[in-house]
Amino acid sequence: MMFVAATIAVIISILLGLIRAFLGPTIYDRVLAGNMIGTLTVILISVHGFLTERPEFLDIALVYALINFIGTIAILKYFRFKDLGHAGTDHSANEQENM
């Protein structure tokens, strides 16, 4: 019964994250909400694996957590530098040197 309550709480949190993802005023709010949804999904997968007594779900949750982290970093890099292929430079530092 306690795990059912935990699952319901996680699903409500995911719904709140979806609301923030759609209404967030900045792109960073939306990315943070997406990262939160990914983290809560990892928890949901782990709880489901525990309830069904399938420990291999923990491996799936760990892989999903790594993909979530790398995806978040890639999205933030893309919005900062508009490119994923290069190391990128900090444009504000270059502009200050030219002044």
Image (spheres, grey):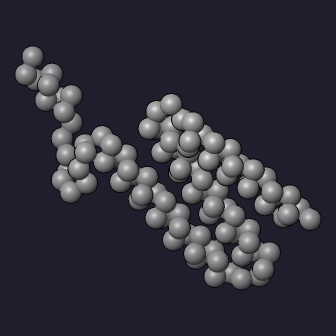
Residue at the front extreme?
22
Along the line of sight, the residue nearer the viewer: 81 or 55 = 81
In this view, 21 is above or below 61: above
Taking 45 as reference, is 60 left or right? Answer: left
Say which quarter of the image contains residue 84.
bottom left
Residue at the right extreme?
1
In this view, 95 is above or below 77: above
Q: Residue at x 73, y 55 (%)?
A: 10
Q: Give residue 74's position: percent from left, percent from top.
A: 35, 54
In this view, 5 is above or below 59: above
Give the quarter of the figure containing the N terminus: bottom right
Q: Total of numbered circles in the picture?
A: 0
Q: Residue at x 56, y 42 (%)?
A: 22
Residue at the left extreme?
98
Along the line of sight, the residue nearer the viewer: 2 or 18 = 18
Q: Give residue 93's position: percent from left, percent from top.
A: 18, 29
Give the quarter of the figure containing the C terminus: top left
Q: Give residue 96's position: percent from left, percent from top.
A: 15, 22
Q: Residue at x 60, y 53 (%)?
A: 37
Q: Give residue 83's position: percent from left, percent from top.
A: 23, 50
Say which quarter of the image contains residue 57.
bottom right
Q: Residue at x 63, y 61 (%)?
A: 41
Taking 77 as reference, is 52 left or right? Answer: right
